[in-house]
Amino acid sequence: MLGTPATFVIVAITVLVWFAQLATGGVNGPVTAALLFNPSLVAAEPWRLVTTMLVHGGILHIGFNMWAVWIFGQILERMLGSWRFVALYVISGIVGSMAVTLIAPQTSVIGASGAIFGLFACFFVLQHSLGGNAVQILVVIALNLVIGFIVPGIAWQAHVGGIVGGFLTGFIFARTRALRRRNLQIALLIAEAIAAVVVSYVGYSLYY
């Protein structure tokens, strides 16, 4: 936890929500129902674009996701700082939900996978921009994408959206690294998040 408080808080809150799910009927209970994302709810309850990242299915679902957040979160939080890491995580999750709205508008989704794919993608961009070897993370992204496509019940649309969000956010970080460009960086991150929400509304209006 030392030096990476945001990663610890994200994992802790997500695990606590999962225990609340278990105590109230699991994936069919009221906690899950209150936080999951379905594109039909974008207009009435837009916060679900984010809260879906807090709810999970079985132990393997939350176990793998929180392991990924713990490993990559600590790395990225040390690279970016806490507030940038949180921005990356949330924006990637929103873009993941946006992709579900556009591609699978009848689908209900739960889990932080979109945000996690955003972490993978951002790490790739940052490694590449710093001249590091980014091939291994590309392999990780590809393998996990393939699993999402072939295993039933996985919202691969959120994975694809998360990758897009992570790549774009990483590009913003890489191009606005200088201290004098901090205000531009903040403005671009806010614009990215707003654009993802607006596109989600557009997708909603097309299908509902």
Image (cartoon, rainbow, N blue to C red):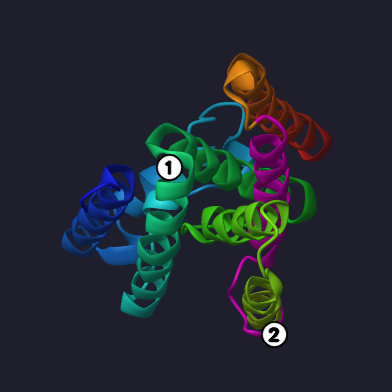
| Residue 187 location (% of width, % of height) | 64, 17
Residue 157, image quadrant: bottom right
| Main SS of residues in magenta | helix
Residue 150, image quadrant: bottom right
Left or right for 46, reference 133: left
Q: Residue reaching furthest right?
A: 206
- Where 65 falls versus 199 (above or below)? below
* Contact between labelled residues 1 and 2, with CB atoms less than 8 Å apart: no
Indicate the amino acid at tag 1. Answer: Thr
What stretch of residues is rendered in magenta?
Answer: 149-176
Q: Secondary structure at mark 1?
A: helix
**How far apart in space, not on screen, are marks 2 and 1 (Cα)?**
26 Å
Indicate the amino acid at tag 2. Answer: Ile
Residue at x-position 55% and y-position 26%: 44
Residue at x-position 72% and y-position 42%: 171
Left or right for 125, reference 23: right
Q: Is residue 116 magenta?
A: no
Q: Residue reaching furthest left?
A: 23
Q: Label for residue 51?
A: 1
Residue placed under numbered mark 2 in the picture: 150
User: Which one is nearer the viewer's eye here, 106 or 3?
Assistant: 3
Residue at x-position 58% and y-position 56%: 114
Q: Residues within 10 Å of mark 2 (few under 14, many from 20)?
A: few
Q: Earlier in the sequence, mark 2 or mark 1?
A: 1
- Where 136 falls versus 20 (above or below)? below
| Residue 128 location (% of width, % of height) | 71, 58
| Residue 3 location (% of width, % of height) | 27, 46
Q: Residues within 10 Å of mark 1 (few under 14, many from 20)?
A: many
- Quarter holding the C terminus is top right
User: Which one is nearer the viewer's eye here, 55 or 164?
Assistant: 164
